[in-house]
Amino acid sequence: MFDIFYVLFLFSIFLCWGSFLNVVAYRITYDKPFFTKRSVCPFCGKIVFWYDNLPILSWVLLRGRCRFCRASISILYPCIELLSGILFTSLVLFFPLASYLLFFSALIIAIRTDLEAMVIPQVFSIWLAPVGVLLSLFGFTRVSFWESLLGALVGYGVLWSIAALFKYFTKRDGLGVGDMELLAMIGSFLGPIGVWFSVFIGSVSGLVIGGGYLLLTKKGRNTRIPFGPFLALGATIYFFFESFLFRVFF
């Protein structure tokens, strides 16, 4: 049984880490410089006070609006912070592998950028695939070197094949290259079985959630829906519930 104060301490630390990931995701999406002194409102340019940067709490107290110009602050900010707090606290408590702090940080950034701008930065996807393979070589991941290498290759190849077939039969682009690169990174950390579950869970959840979104908003079926967050969901579920999934499917 974990000490409640230790859990709360971890959760508060990782809320702050989630706030940092928000900043990284925003600045890389909109090509903003990383090394600036203070965060500013993107609408009015006013410097954001430190007490308006408190994870989740500040967004709630400000009612999701800038203190000065009252422009809307994206709900992605508190959602990413809360997700980071829950995810990383669970990781440290149950699977204390430092390499997966990097892995899930990249997934969270990919979720934020894909939802906001439908782009997945290569530095947090394909560029990390060799890192995952190298970490596996030295035993810092849950998969072997060969599983990691195969997972990266299969991860990219599977979505590339699906996208190629989709374009051949429909004459339209389906999956983006960013999704392929993200799945290659996922494969390097989780292996080929992790790739399969990520695609399976991601596809099912994407069909249900994406379909529900289209129905509720009454948008056309040609509306683009980011697939990266669903791949990240599949990878996360596989990582934390691998044993259960194996019992169910195998």
Image (cartoon, rainbow, N blue to C red):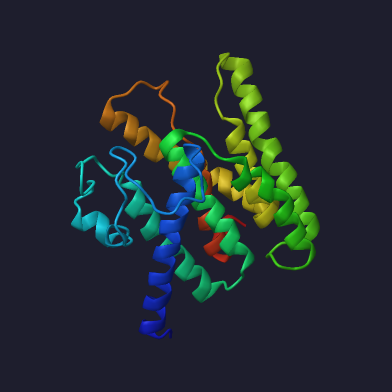
Q: Work out whether 12 lies above or below 239.
A: below
- Picture residue at 47% right of the left edge, 33% below the top: 118
Q: Quadrant of the C terminus?
A: bottom right
Q: Work out whether 121 lies above or below 249.
A: above
Residue 192 locus on image (x, y percent): 69, 50
* Quadrant in the picture for residue 59: bottom left
Q: Is residue 229 visible?
A: no
Q: Work out whether 73 lies above or below 242.
A: above
Position of 31 compared to 19: left or right? Answer: right
Position of 186 compared to 223: left or right? Answer: right
Residue 27 locus on image (x, y percent): 47, 44
Q: Quadrant of the N terminus?
A: bottom left
- Picture residue at 56% right of the left edge, 29% below the top: 175
- In depth, the one of 36 and 206 nearer the eye is 36
Q: Is residue 171 visible?
A: yes
- In depth, the one of 184 and 167 nearer the eye is 184
Position of 209 compared to 184: left or right? Answer: left
Residue 199 locus on image (x, y percent): 57, 43
- Picture residue at 43% right of the left edge, 51% below the top: 22
Q: Work out whether 209 lies above or below 15.
A: above
- Picture residue at 26% right of the left edge, 61% below the top: 57
